[in-house]
Image (spheres, grey):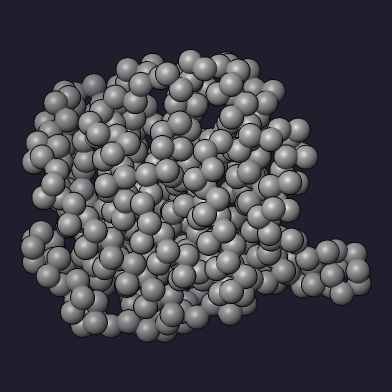
Amino acid sequence: MPETTLHPPRRTRFIDLLDAGMRLGRKAGLLEPPKLEREALMANAAEYTGLGDFGDPWFLDPFDKLLDALHGEARLNAAGEWAAKKQFEKVLHDRLWAQQWFERYPEILARPLPHPVVVVGPMRSGTTRLHRLLSGDTRFTHLRSFETISPVPRPDFELGGHDSRVELAAKLKRLAKLSNPHTLTIHPTGPFEPEEELGLLCNSFWGLKHPSQWWIPSYSRWCEEHDATGAYEQLARLLKLVGWAQQASSLRPWVLKMAQHMLDLPALLKVFPDARIVFTHRDPLSVVGSAASLAWNQTVIYSDHADPHAIGDEWLRTTRVMIERMRAVRPKIPRSRFVDVHFDEMERDWRGTMERVYRFLGFDIGPAIPAMEAYQRRTHRRHRRRHRYSLEEFGLTPRRVLDELGEYMRTYEIASDARRSASAG
């Protein structure tokens, strides 16, 4: 297990100063608290864009539940309220602009999404490494970081021309480094790095991104009790838009990955009925500790009241629910449609493991090996700081985690990470 610490890291002074400045501005009457109300946010977005069609209204219910949880539970600081408003505005602008693109170019929605390859596993279980290895293969299509941050091109975008979304992604990375550099240690990225489709689900105000950055347990439970099909239908529409903007062949399969898919496998398989799934598995002692650390390092930016023990409890519960949902659906998936990959396998022999994945996919791995080797060299050259965390700093013990998730380890013959220090997943 990782080296034990009892105190999770604090945020940077940059956020403290930004929050203090905003509070002083409010006190002096120079700043108004942001109005986090759906009707006002949607009206402002319509006025800003000059558009009125937000697309499928499915998103309204999760948006309402998210706002209710923010007001009732999140206890955002001034900087957190401002950031939430900016995030909501961006999603609403993107929804309006997406509908405009669909109306201008109906052929976008006619693009097929044939047999995608979907990496499905708990947070921090090695999904990023597997996804990026697959994404180096030009026979697949993948999202880049700037596209998951901004899946919808601006109205002045031209195919093959300048794309302002790249500059926005670079700016947000610099802001993240100022706000809390630990987040980039946990999940290093850059504008053109292959990235998961998290932002495409956020376009429907759905998904784990929200409880990963705000303390909103009621929202999490509401989502767990509701069908996610509407969010996945919007995800598919946005994938078609991204592929069209990339000028990618619509015959190339997409490579996708998100921890959210563990919770929403029925919706995923309904919207992508010919998906091929790569399940990833890792010692839950590492998964839970790392997931709690990721959530802590984001939540502490937006709230002055983040409780590490409450976050530990919540991410143990969330990990358990994710595994239970995955296990309930697996027997209904034809065995020829999925393969299992273990974290320790990739640690020992990434190439041999990937050869097995490629046999499952029916692809010759040979053309992909140079890009995979280049990715491995690139990650080794970074010499980035280790992501260090412990269960104890989040009020958890190995015994408690294994009491809840040990049977999962035994069923899938998951090796212990006990002799290794933690690494990003």
Q: Is residue 305 visible?
A: yes
**In the image, is residue 361 above or below residue 158?**
below
Count of picture labels: 0
Q: Residue at x 9, y 36 (%)?
A: 336
Q: Is residue 363 left or right of residue 379?
A: left
Instruction: Name the spot of residue 425 as percent of width and height, x first.
Output: 33, 54
Q: Is residue 96 left or right of residue 330?
A: right
119 or 282: nearer the eye? Answer: 119
Q: Quadrant of the N terminus?
A: bottom left
Q: Is residue 5 visible?
A: no
Instruction: Name the spot of residue 143 as percent of width and height, x first.
Output: 43, 34
Q: Residue at x 58, y 31 (%)?
A: 98
Q: Quadrant of residue 229?
A: top left
74 or 3: nearer the eye? Answer: 74
Q: Residue at x 68, y 59 (%)?
A: 37
**In the image, is residue 81 above or below residue 59?**
below
Instruction: Name the spot of residue 323 as percent of width and height, x first.
Output: 23, 61
**In the image, is residue 342 above or below residue 324?**
above
Q: Residue at x 15, y 65 (%)?
A: 408
Instruction: Name the spot of residue 95 as percent of width and height, x first.
Output: 59, 38
